[in-house]
Amino acid sequence: MILYVLLMPVCVALLARELLILAGLLKDPILRTFEKYGDLEPVYYPLPALLLWFGLLLFCLAPLAAPALGGAAPLVLPALGLMGTALWCHLHPELARQHPALLMRHPRWYADLRERTSRYERRRLAYLWLTLPWRLRLRYNGSDRAFNHWADLVIMATMRYDEQASLGDQPSRYHIWDY
């Protein structure tokens, strides 16, 4: 019983984290997917995590609500169903790639960024995101407008750097300020 009570705040916190990501108020996990190299660009797939943490939360609530509900079964069975669905979704991500509008919900800033940037630019954004101080990351997490402005500046710097490299010039370390 104590284990369920201790596990419940963890489930609530991780469920809240996933909801903040979907609302666009936490950008770190999605930006971290841009760092990876490979043939297919990895895509942030929030459905399995949402189902898992909601199922675990119901499973932890079952012993506490059992006296009021006449047993734990009314919460345990849906919890096991949600966790099983989360496992199935995790093992079959190709279904989400086939139906992205239904199964891959993302915040608006993510959709805008994918439309206007290349994979190389998104990777550069992800690596530069890691160099930002945490207070600036908090500001960008809370404001899509400020984040988009920062992303535009990074994209412009990337274009200037690529332009100099294609001309054969040796760009300096501080290429943004070389005018």
Image (cartoon, rainbow, N blue to C red):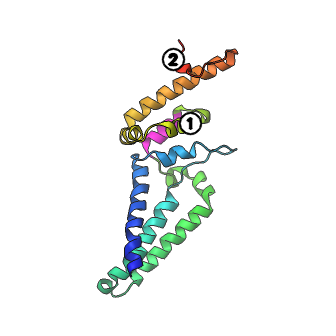
Q: Which residues are magenta?
A: 107-115
Q: x, y (%) of residue 108?
A: 43, 42
On screen, residue 168 versus residue 64, left or right, reads right
Q: Which residue is mark 1?
A: 122
Question: Which residue is at the front of the view, 30 or 45?
Answer: 30
On screen, residue 145 versus residue 115, left or right, reads left
Label 1 amino acid? Arg
Question: Which residue is at the front of the view, 163 or 44?
Answer: 163
Q: Is residue 39 above or below residue 64?
A: above
Decide which of tag 2 and tag 1 comes sooner along the chain: 1
Label 2 amino acid? Trp
Indicate whether residue 99 is drawn in magenta. no
Q: x, y (%) of residue 53?
A: 45, 65
Q: Quadrant of residue 148?
A: top left
On residue 67, the disc is none
Q: Quadrant of residue 171?
A: top right
Q: x, y (%) of residue 149?
A: 42, 29
On residue 177, the disc is 2
Q: Main secondary structure of the magenta part?
A: helix
Q: Is residue 50 above or below residue 1?
A: above
Q: Secondary structure at mark 2?
A: helix
Question: Which residue is at the front of the view, 176 or 47?
Answer: 176
Residue, x 53% and y 11% (percent of image)? 179
Considering the image in quadrants, where does the N terminus appear?
Answer: bottom left
Residue at mark 2 to residue at mark 1: CA–CA distance: 22 Å
Q: Is residue 27 above or below residue 48?
A: above
Residue, x 66% and y 20% (percent of image)? 165
Q: Secondary structure at mark 1?
A: helix
Q: Quick one: which residue is furthest to the top in this view? A: 179
Q: Quick one: which residue is furthest to the left in this view? A: 68
